[in-house]
Image (tube, grey):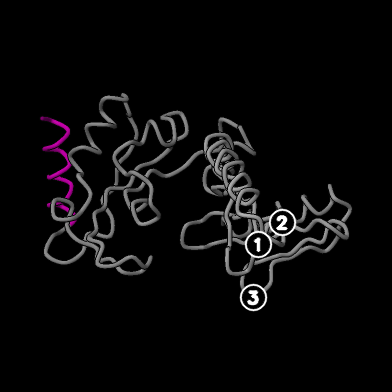
Amino acid sequence: MSLENAKENLAEFGKELGLEGLEFDENNTCILGIDDEFSMHLTYEPNSDRLYLYSPLLDGLPKDNKICQGLYERLLEGSMLGGQMAGGGVGVAVKEELILMHCTIDMEHAILEAVPSPSNGVTYCQGMYIFGEDPHTPDETWGMDRIFFCHARNLIRHGPAFWEYEEVPLDKGDVDIAKCVRALMDARYEGVMIPEHLGEGTSLAESVAYLKGLINL
């Protein structure tokens, strides 16, 4: 879903620049040669579901230490401003003597902004924890008007890679399901919550009973 969204946005971006036929390569990267001096690199990262944009600013560093220090100070200011304003910043590859400007687009959230229709919403799933989202703040993350349906699931992360996790019963994992249910109740959610991916050692009936107990606290 999000990769297709990224491809569609890349095509539209190319039309705006007058560059037809843009597409990602086997590494999910596209390099745009805007002119003889400016290029932009776009990379889609499937594990985090984000689109990373890079653009070289300089391909060499000053040899004079004083000038170099002044440059680093300016870059630090730019990086701090970029982080606050656009989720990006400035990076320095000292060995390659390359300075890059970058920003990040969260494709999952971008689709809600691109299509602000009341019919465009999400399924709130605690599995978002795998992608670095906070699963305990559905209202703050998505907005209750965007949550059409809820899952209830829990997991234990065993390593940094996306696939290094184990599905477990609702009361056994890294996610505080009680906190998630309280957040929904506080936000006056009145929709459906369905247990899923329950792991071994529990049943659907036990999971429903567990959720009912949390709701009735």
Q: Which residue is mark 2?
A: 58
User: CB of mark 2 within 8 Å of CB of mark 1?
Assistant: yes
Up the image or down, 111 lies above or below 161; here it is above
The residue type indicated by label 3 comes to Glu
Residue type, mark 1 in image: Leu
Question: Horizontal placement of 215 versus 58: left or right?
Answer: left
Q: Earlier in the sequence, mark 1 or mark 3?
A: 3
Magenta residues, start to end: 204-217
Determine whether the residue tagged by mark 3 lies in a helix, strand or loop: loop
Q: Position of residue 155 (x, y in %)?
A: 24, 58
Disc 3 designates what residue?
Answer: 26
Label 3: few (<14), some or many (≥20) within 10 Å? few
In front here: 190 or 88? Answer: 88
Q: Secondary structure at mark 1?
A: strand
- Which residue was labeled with disc 1? 98
Quick one: label 2 or label 1, which is nearer the N terminus? 2
Three-letter code, disc 2: Leu
Q: Quadrant of the N terminus?
A: bottom right
The residue at 32%/44% (across/down) is 135
**For residue 27, what is the image quadrant?**
bottom right
- Of the pair 13 and 127, the residue shown nearer to us: 13
Nearest to the eye among marks 2 and 3: give it. Answer: 2
- Horizontal arrangement in the rendering, residue 101 relative to residue 168 (left or right): right
- 176 or 62: nearer the viewer: 62
Q: Confirm whether the magenta stretch covers residue 215.
A: yes
